[in-house]
Image (cartoon, helix red, strand yellow):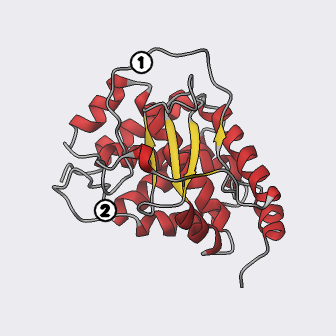
């Protein structure tokens, strides 16, 4: 049964809106010299600036919930990316180190396609956990961009984005521990969706890891939070790198 926006917001308290948000920017940052990279795109070559950006769902409660979640994740991960919803293009969620002209001083950009967000939101009773988990996955990519050494190690480990993606899955699971530490069964909705996003295109540059690998990485991050709730995100980033590069095969 499809829930009303008010019911969804009340039950989940997570990012459920379709607003355009620029989180409070840092002081103007220096150009990193990196080319735009779309880690979670099936096609990393399309023009981000050609996308049709949307400003609101038209449902203020959902917009407020999304803004609240984005600020929570910004505080948790210690980064301030711009966040855009777009209504055309492929159904996807993605992160790029590119800073859009309208959002100077931010730490890169996260984008989420509106139809995909709506599908995630309404696909299950706990659909909001999927939305929050997907956004956390993208925030993890923003964290990877901020550490070129780690980014290079994860990319060089396989020659595709596989280990970057599995590391982001681990960090998404770690973040979701802050929401579901006392009810781990509620992680299952997100875990099933992450499982669906895996692939077996082992030699493609866009290979994200198999369904089983993505599922394992997400749950490992969640367990790490349960076992070490006092640790900070820096420790989790290091643990996630060690985990994915030691547990999963390169091919």
Crowd class of label 1 (few under 14; some 14 to 19; many from 20; radius 10 Å): few
Q: Position of residue 198 (x, y in %)?
A: 35, 63
Q: Is residue 222 visible?
A: no
- Element carrying mark 1: loop
Quarter holding the N terminus is bottom right
Quarter holding the C terminus is bottom left
Which is more N-terminal, label 2 or label 1?
1
Q: Is residue 48 visible?
A: yes
Q: Which residue is mark 2?
A: 210
Question: Which residue is pictured at 34% across the width and 31% down the height?
Answer: 151
Q: Position of residue 13 (x, y in %)?
A: 77, 56
Q: Is residue 175 left or right of residue 98?
A: right
Question: Which residue is pictured at 24% across the width and 65% down the height?
Answer: 200
Q: Nearer the viewer, residue 220 or 120?
A: 120
Given the current orientation, which residue lies at the most extreme bottom position?
A: 1
Q: Which residue is mark 1?
A: 31
Answer with the quarter of the image where residue 23 lies.
top right
Question: Which residue is pictured at 52% across the width and 65% down the height?
Answer: 116
Q: Position of residue 158 (x, y in %)?
A: 20, 43
Answer with the quarter of the image where residue 148 lies.
top left
Crowd class of label 2 (few under 14; some 14 to 19; many from 20; radius 10 Å): some
Q: Nearer the viewer, residue 68 or 229?
A: 68
Answer with the quarter of the image where residue 106 lies.
top right
Callout 1–callout 2 Cβ contact below 8 Å: no
């Amino acid at each position: 049964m499809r829930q009303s926006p008010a019911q969804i917001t009340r039950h989940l308290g997570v990012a459920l809106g379709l607003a355009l948000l620029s989180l409070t920017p840092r002081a103007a940052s220096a150009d990193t010299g990196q080319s735009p990279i779309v880690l979670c795109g099936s096609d990393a070559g399309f023009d981000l600036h050609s996308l049709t950006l949307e400003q609101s769902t038209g449902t203020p409660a959902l917009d407020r919930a999304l803004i609240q979640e984005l600020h929570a994740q910004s505080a948790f991960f210690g980064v301030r990316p711009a966040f855009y919803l777009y209504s055309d293009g492929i159904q996807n969620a993605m992160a790029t180190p590119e800073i859009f002209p309208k959002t100077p001083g931010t730490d890169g950009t996260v984008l989420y396609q509106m139809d995909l967000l709506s599908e995630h939101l309404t696909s299950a009773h706990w659909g909001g956990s999927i939305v929050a988990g997907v956004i956390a996955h993208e925030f993890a990519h923003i964290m990877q961009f901020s550490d070129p050494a780690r980014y290079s190690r994860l990319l060089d480990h396989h020659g595709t984005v596989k280990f970057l993606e599995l590391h982001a899955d681990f960090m998404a699971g770690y973040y979701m521990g802050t929401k579901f530490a006392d009810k781990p069964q509620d992680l299952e909705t997100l875990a099933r969706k992450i499982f669906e996003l895996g692939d077996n295109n082992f030699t493609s540059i866009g290979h994200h890891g198999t369904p089983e690998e993505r599922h394992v990485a997400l749950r490992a991050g969640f367990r790490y939070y349960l076992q070490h709730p006092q640790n900070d995100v820096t420790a989790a980033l290091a643990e996630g790198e060690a985990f994915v590069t030691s547990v999963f095969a390169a091919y």
